[in-house]
Image (cartoon, rainbow, N blue to C red):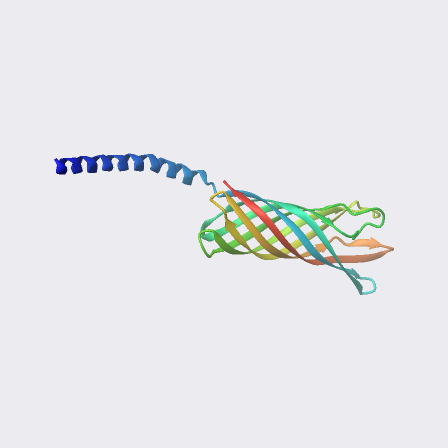
Amino acid sequence: MRIKLLLTLLALTGALYAQEVEEMEPMEEISSSEKSGLYFGVDLFNADLSYTFQNTSFNTSIDHDTKSKGFRLKMGTRAEDNWRVQGHLSVENIDDNIFSLTGNDGDLVELGADVIKAFELSDSFSLYILGGVSYGSMSVKGYNEDTINNLGLKLGTGVLFAINETLELTAGIDFKYRAWTDVQLLGQTIETSDSSSYPYLGINIHF
């Protein structure tokens, strides 16, 4: 009787286990298929900006330091070997009036693209480096043109922390160089560039 009872219990246990495995396997397949590699995110930053204004007629220059704050919206995709490519739209408010002769500068709006390489240290923690380019525009007052544009290059580094398969926190710093459109002032050409650092915190949502 004892042997029959043990065999019966063993058979029932095996049947229940097989049923549980059959129910779990489709869920795992759905979970893996739902991840498309795409992600959306937002970063908040406070930047230190260092401008150089070069008078090409007299070969003189003036430096000016200021700060800014803003946000960046991101959309990207993950590739093999922890590579990522992302595009972003940023809106930046500069503390000082940099260009306008009358009134105030508008917010700086930039479009950019980054290539990112991550290095996994654990299942949830990674370091990364990145390089990127950007194009920006800002409204100004007091010139013939009502906008001034820039081209930017940047290098950066940071960390990623995965809360789960969907949410990811990021913290980093970008080092950026921008060359701005030349402006004409009193018949003289003024070249403008800035070298800036952008510490930021952000969150990514993976799909």
Above or below — where is 106 with respect to 197? above
Q: Is residue 97 left or right of residue 14?
A: right
* Outermost residue toward the front in this view: 2
Q: In the figure, is residue 58 to the left or right of 177?
A: right
- Please tell me in which quadrant of the rendered image residue 55 appears: bottom right
In-front residue for pair 146/71: 71
Give residue 20's quadrant in the image.
top left
Count of residue discs: 0
Residue placed at 49% from the left, 42% from the top? 166
* Position above or below: 39 against 180: above
Q: Does 195 sit above or below residue 7? A: below
Q: Residue at x 81, y 57 (%)?
A: 189
72 vs 161, nearest the viewer = 161
In the picture, which quadrant includes the N terminus? Answer: top left
The picture places residue 170, in percent across and down from the top left corner, at 56, 50
Residue 24 falls left or right of residue 90: left
Q: Which one is nearer the viewer's eye here, 198 or 191?
A: 198
Judge from the rendering whether residue 2 lies leftward or rightward of residue 92; answer left or right: left
Q: Picture coordinates of residue 100 (x, y %)?
A: 81, 49
Foreground pick, 74 / 147? 74
Query: Which residue appears at 49% of the width and 52% of the height?
Result: 83
Q: Residue at x 47, y 44 (%)?
A: 165
Residue at the extreme right: 186
The percent coordinates of residue 107 (x first, y second) are 73, 46
Residue 152 percent coordinates (x, y): 66, 54
